[in-house]
Image (spheres, coloured by chain):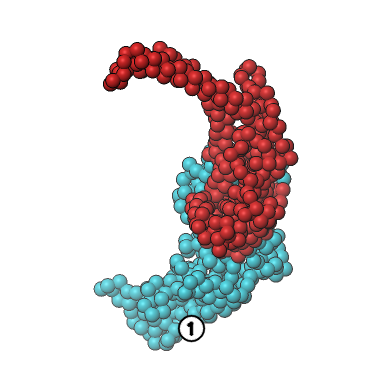
């Protein structure tokens, strides 16, 4: 197994196209972090009375039947209201900034960089599809299977390699979050004092859940690739997820409807519920829009985990069976 | 490395695809050492058989053993087999050396052993000069050579080669033939599937000929060809030839004559070993040949005869038929 892992790692190391994708995960995360900070730190422009007056006058500020003295009074009133509104906006904004800018302070920055982990999931599933699909395209599936001996080891090695890679990517993102928040501190960027503490346990559970979902996705990618013998299996997975999401959004699957319970065996719906639950529990400011599922939405977190694990096990069993039973005609 | 039993053995091997049997009950027994030729026209089932032998396909029925162990996909014994099957299986984004390192590492060869071995394998197939170049830029012939090197990197006891000279230039063909001969000389058993019949005739100690998924002939190459030996007797005069024809009866036929010239040549259905007795018999009747030579069937003629469509005759030799070879039965004689 170690020999196969070494060989796989050697192969992966030479795939510059795939490494560009991994680097892309970091770049997208860093770009999102920096552009988010720039947006959050920017104050709205101060009230410009001259500009406001010019705007009023350019339209010819006259009202039929109103005396000029009253008109001037109304004009001044409008200016005062606009100034007050702008000042209120600024005050609201400053208050909001006290919260928003905490997203960029360690350890909140970890949740800000990783988020719900959608980019790493997409990229690593794509990498798995390409790397495995290319074995069929190049015909090297023959030599790879022969070298592996037991075909089960061939698949297990690939999954182990990608599990390690996924762990490394997440660690890298944690490191990136640390570096970026330190960078803000070092450069004297405006930050808000931490008043909302990140729940480290829930955040760790959230990252672990994201990794778990990623592993299930990787096994699914492996399964679809060995069935289709094609790197484009990634597209099929995307279409499949889209169809599942659309199905679970049908009215019959809504809480209280006839197929309410059936909805809770769908993979995507349980992933969404579990991640929302953990995101809300983490007190991550960047994930504050996540609402924990209510009692009518979900049976419970243990059930969500059980469903996700069950799907993962099913994918493993099917992929293993497929790789062991298939005829290699490439 | 000699083993007591056959290196490859199949019993009633069947592989069914959709509606047809690609392999239809093949029984083979490949002895250890030497080069074993595996012949057949396109679609005869050669590659399918080879894929079963290296564990890439599951047989529909029957089974095979390699080096005495049963072969199924994933069998441990396959680690002792090197193979090159149809198009070369190489990673285009790796250099020639890196390809060998990947295959060798996966096979569990320690890196300190692997590096010199990879260099040696590349030298053996004539790719040392391009060892650091990406294989994606290689010509068909270079890819074939690299695939051959990957088959040899694990120092296998058995090498299975499917059309190894495909895409090679004449020099490459000669190099690969020499390589196969040297492997056999080193004690490695080579199972060679090829369309190049002179190559098989030159290299192989034994051959099996396939038609429509079945073995139609199997045995030592010289026995297969020896069965087709004939004696050609030329006389000075047509009268002597006519008298000899009458004397020999059904054994002899009139040979091809040059138009406008008398028919003075007879073809006698006897092997070279019968030449002296034939000469004595003719001499006893006062007939003295001007020339007595041996005509040997080429493997190509034997192949065409055995693989001809029984209904249309397409593919049949236009020359005299080869000596009969019992279907699926071994030709008598020893190859070593």
Q: Which residue is drawn at 64% across and 38% down?
A: A169
Q: Mark 1 lies on which chain?
A: B
Q: Residue at x 42, y 87 (%)?
A: B249
User: Label 1 belongs to which residue?
Assistant: B281
* Residue A37 rendering spot, x and y as whole percentages: 57, 26
Mark 1 Cα-neighbour bin, 10 Å: few <14, some 14–19, many ≥20: some
Q: Which residue is drawn at 53% across and 80% down?
A: B326
Q: The cyan chain is which one?
A: B
Q: Judge whether B219 appears above or below B189 on screen.
A: below
The residue closer to the viewer here, A29 or A281, is A281
Quadrant containing the C terminus of chain B is bottom right
The residue closer to the viewer here, B224 or B231, is B224
Q: Along the horizontal axis of the image, is B177 left or right of A105? A: left
Asked which secondary structure carries label 1, the reply is: helix
The residue closer to the viewer here, B129 or A224, is A224
The residue closer to the viewer here, A84 or A267, is A84
Q: The red chain is which one?
A: A
Question: Which residue extends farthest left?
Answer: B260
Q: Judge whether B84 appears above or below B21 on screen.
A: above
* Residue A258 rendering spot, x and y as whole percentages: 55, 63
* Residue A97 rendering spot, x and y as whole percentages: 59, 25
Quadrant containing the N terminus of chain B is bottom right
């Amino acid at each position: 197994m170690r020999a196969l892992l070494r060989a796989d790692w050697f192969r992966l190391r030479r795939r510059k196209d795939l490494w560009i994708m991994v680097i892309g995960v970091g770049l997208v995360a860093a770009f999102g972090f920096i552009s988010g900070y720039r947006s959050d730190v920017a104050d709205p422009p101060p009230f410009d009375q001259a500009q406001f007056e010019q705007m009023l006058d350019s339209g010819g500020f006259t009202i039929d039947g109103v005396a000029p003295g009253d008109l001037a009074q109304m004009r001044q009133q409008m200016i005062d209201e606009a100034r007050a509104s702008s000042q209120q906006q600024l005050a609201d904004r400053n208050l909001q900034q006290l919260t928003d800018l905490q997203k960029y302070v360690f350890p909140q920055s970890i949740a800000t960089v990783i988020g719900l982990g959608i980019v790493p999931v997409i990229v690593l599933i794509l990498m798995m599809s390409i790397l495995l699909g290319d074995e069929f395209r190049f015909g090297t599936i023959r030599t790879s299977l022969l070298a592996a001996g037991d075909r089960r080891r061939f698949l297990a090695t690939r999954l182990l390699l990608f599990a390690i890679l996924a762990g490394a990517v997440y660690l890298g993102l944690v490191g990136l979050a640390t570096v970026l928040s330190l960078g803000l501190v070092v450069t004297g960027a405006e930050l808000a004092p931490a008043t909302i503490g990140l729940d480290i346990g829930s955040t760790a559970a959230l990252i672990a859940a994201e990794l778990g979902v990623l592993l299930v996705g990787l096994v699914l990618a492996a399964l679809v690739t060995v069935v289709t013998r094609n790197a484009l299996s990634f597209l099929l997975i995307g279409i499949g997820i889209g169809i599942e999401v659309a199905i679970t959004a049908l009215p019959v699957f809504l809480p209280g409807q006839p197929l309410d319970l059936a909805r809770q065996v769908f993979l995507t719906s349980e992933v969404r519920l579990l991640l929302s639950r953990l995101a809300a529990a983490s007190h991550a400011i960047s994930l504050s829009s996540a609402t924990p599922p209510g009692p009518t939405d979900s049976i419970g977190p243990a059930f969500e985990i059980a469903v996700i694990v069950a799907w993962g096990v099913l994918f493993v069993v099917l992929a293993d069976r497929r790789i062991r039973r298939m005829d290699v005609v490439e | 490395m000699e083993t007591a039993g056959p290196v490859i053995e199949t019993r009633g091997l069947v592989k069914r695809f959709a509606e047809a049997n690609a392999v239809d009950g093949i029984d083979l027994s490949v002895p250890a050492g030497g080069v074993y030729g595996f012949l057949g026209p396109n679609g005869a089932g050669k590659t399918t058989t080879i894929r079963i032998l290296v564990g890439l396909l599951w047989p529909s029925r029957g089974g095979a053993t390699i080096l005495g162990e049963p072969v199924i996909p994933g069998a441990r014994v396959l680690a002792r087999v090197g193979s090159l099957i149809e198009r070369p299986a190489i990673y285009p984004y790796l250099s020639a050396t890196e390809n060998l390192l990947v295959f060798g590492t996966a096979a569990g060869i320690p890196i300190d052993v692997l590096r010199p071995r990879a260099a040696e394998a590349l030298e053996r197939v004539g790719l040392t000069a391009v060892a650091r170049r990406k294989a994606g830029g290689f010509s068909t012939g270079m890819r074939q050579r690299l695939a051959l090197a990957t088959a040899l990197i694990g120092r296998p006891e058995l090498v299975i080669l499917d059309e190894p000279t495909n895409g090679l230039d004449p020099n490459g063909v000669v190099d690969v033939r020499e390589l196969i001969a040297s492997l056999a000389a080193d004690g490695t058993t080579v199972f060679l599937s090829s369309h190049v019949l002179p190559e098989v005739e030159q290299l192989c100690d034994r051959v099996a000929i396939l038609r429509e998924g079945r073995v139609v002939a199997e045995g030592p190459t010289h026995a297969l060809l020896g069965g087709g030996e004939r004696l050609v007797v030329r006389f000075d005069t047509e009268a002597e030839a006519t008298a000899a024809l009458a004397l020999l009866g059904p054994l002899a036929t009139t040979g091809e004559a040059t138009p406008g010239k008398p028919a003075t040549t007879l073809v006698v259905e006897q092997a070279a070993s019968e030449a002296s007795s034939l000469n004595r018999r003719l001499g006893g009747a006062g007939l003295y040949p001007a020339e007595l030579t041996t005509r040997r069937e080429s493997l190509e003629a034997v192949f065409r005869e055995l693989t001809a469509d029984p209904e249309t005759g397409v593919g049949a030799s236009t020359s005299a038929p080869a000596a009969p070879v019992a279907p699926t039965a071994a030709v008598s004689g020893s190859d070593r």
